[in-house]
Image (cartoon, rainbow, N blue to C red):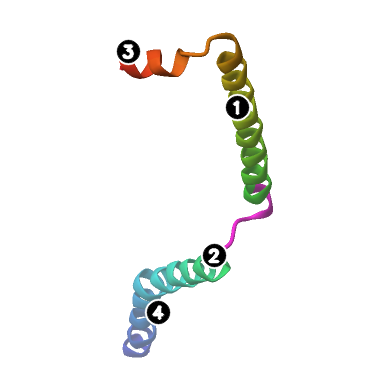
Amino acid sequence: MDGWMIAFFVPIVIFMTIVAPVWIFMHYRTKQRAEGALSDGERLELETLAATAERMMDRVDTLESILDSETPGWRKRMQSEQ
């Protein structure tokens, strides 16, 4: 009975300590790669950031147009200061 228990126990221990963790890791890694897309929360955050960036670009354009009308040579002065 001792030999039979060892013959049964050793492969189970090897499987549980080596094969199972690698198998689980590979399973979830493959699953994550298969999804490959953004989650709903990430997609929402990206859309929010894109909208914020668009608003900031509009503000910069507005500020530049104000500067162009009030201070015509500001761009040349900015380039010469750099």
**Type of amino acid under label 4:** Ile
Mark sitting earlier along the chain (3/4): 4
Q: Which of 74 and 21 is in front in this view?
A: 74
Crowding near the residue tagged with mark 4, few <14, some 14–19, many ≥20 C-alpha atoms within 10 Å: few
Q: In which quarter of the image is residue 22?
A: bottom left
Report how many numbered discs are placed on residues in the image.
4
Q: Label 1 vs label 2: CA separation?
A: 36 Å
Q: Where is residue 10 in the image (x, y as percent from the top left)?
A: 33, 80
> Which residue: 36% across, 69% down?
17
Q: Is mark 3 on a helix, strand or loop?
A: helix
| Left or right: 69 in relation to 23 | right
The reply to whether callout 3 and callout 2 are in contact (CB within 8 Å) is no
Q: Label 1 vs label 3: CA separation?
A: 21 Å
Q: Identify the residue position indicated by label 4 in the image.
A: 12
Q: Identify the residue position indicated by label 3 in the image.
A: 81
Which mark identifies residue 61?
1
Q: Which of 62 and 29 is in front in this view?
A: 62
The reply to whether callout 4 and callout 2 are in contact (CB within 8 Å) is no
> Which residue: 38% across, 84% down?
5
Mark sitting earlier along the chain (1/4): 4
Q: Identify the residue position indicated by label 2 in the image.
A: 36
Mark sitting earlier along the chain (1/3): 1
The magenta segment: 37-41
Q: In which quarter of the image is residue 64?
A: top right
- Magenta-drawn stretch contains 72: no
The quadrant of the picture occupied by the C terminus is: top left
Q: Is mark 4 on a helix, strand or loop?
A: helix
Q: What element carries label 2?
A: loop
Q: Label 3 vs label 2: CA separation?
A: 46 Å
